[in-house]
Image: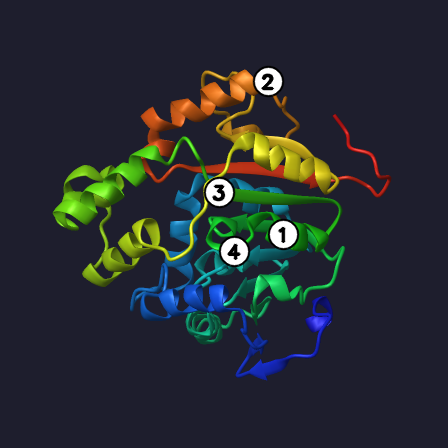
Amino acid sequence: MSEFIKKPFKNNSGVISFSIEDNETKKVTEFYKDTPFPNYKNDDNKQSILEKGNKNILAQKFKKFIGYKKKVLEVGCGTGQLSIYFSLGTNNQIVAFDPTIQSLNLAKNFAKKNNITNIEFVNADIFDDVLVENYFDFVWCNGVLHHTKDPYKAFQIVSKTLKDEGYILIGLYNKIGRIRTLFRKYLSKIFGLKVLEIFDPTLKHLKISKEERKSWIKDQYFHPIESLHTLDEVLNWFKNNNIEYISSIPSCDFEVVQNYDNLFSKSFEGSFYSRIINQISMIFNRLGSDGGLFIVIGKKNIKSGLNKN
């Protein structure tokens, strides 16, 4: 199944592996080496992964839209729960990509233990560009690019792996919507981590172990590399790389209620003002309280050099 790799690699006990040489990427791998995210519970199995995945409305809609006999890439899979969720109950080919070998070993061991065979794991730096072009039907890259040294360059590399008419989902921290999280981070530096237990609404309701809480807090508040972005910025990324805008969360257009049922149906890009207003609204809704992550979905145009509007 390794026809999706274009450079020589080592097989590290079931993980396709490349050397990580970049110092910025090494910062990230060291960060997740100590606190793998999101990690597994001792009693996790296929059923528990399915249940967790189905509770994530975005992942659930994405998996349903994928269908069957498709090639799917998750970039920045961490410990692989989402990639495994996408693989369960399907005949799709899933590729889980991450620079942290310790995280991938956890995913690989879970897959082996549970006899999950339609998934492969790749340990590499995204900037080393090891994947073939025009191969995947779907690419999921949620909460990843803003933890790289050059998010746009990383996006260019990732988008090349997508087939014509393939779909890509990008999730990034929003420059406006993340204000509440940045404020809590500032308070925690002054008053200590206890303040997060008081003011972070997501953390207060997380029913997870002490170690899992530690991993979540570090990932959300103290990552060594973080950048912030806007809807207009990602729309320009799409236009410059022959990707047609499909939809986003929050919506680009004025929309009173976010429609999750039509996430993969073409919607309007709205105007600069509608996009700004919707991003400001993130400060006051769940998107802002949960960290200010926004989602943009695109579809790769057939090679013509033209962008559809």
| Label 4 Cα crowd, 10 Å radius (few <14 / some 14-19 / many 20+) | some
Residue 153: mark in rendering: 1
Q: Residue 177 versus residue 24: which sits nearer the camera?
A: 24
| Residue 292 at x, y percent in the picture | 39, 37
- The residue that appears at 65% across and 39% down in the rendered structure is 237
Q: Secondary structure at mark 3?
A: strand
Mark 2 lies on residue: 271
Does residue 237 appear in the picture of this structure? yes
Give the crowd class for mark 2: few <14, some 14-19, many >=20 residues within 10 Å. Answer: few
**Number of the front mark, 4 or 3:** 4
Q: Which residue is mark 3?
A: 172
Q: Residue furthest right?
A: 304
Q: Is residue 264 visible?
A: no
Name the N-terminal-most of marks 1 and 2: 1
Foreground of the two, 91 or 121? 121
Sequence-earlier tag: 4 or 3: 4
Q: Amino acid at mark 2?
A: Ser
Question: Which label is found at residue 149?
Answer: 4
| Residue 123 pos. (x, y %) | 54, 71
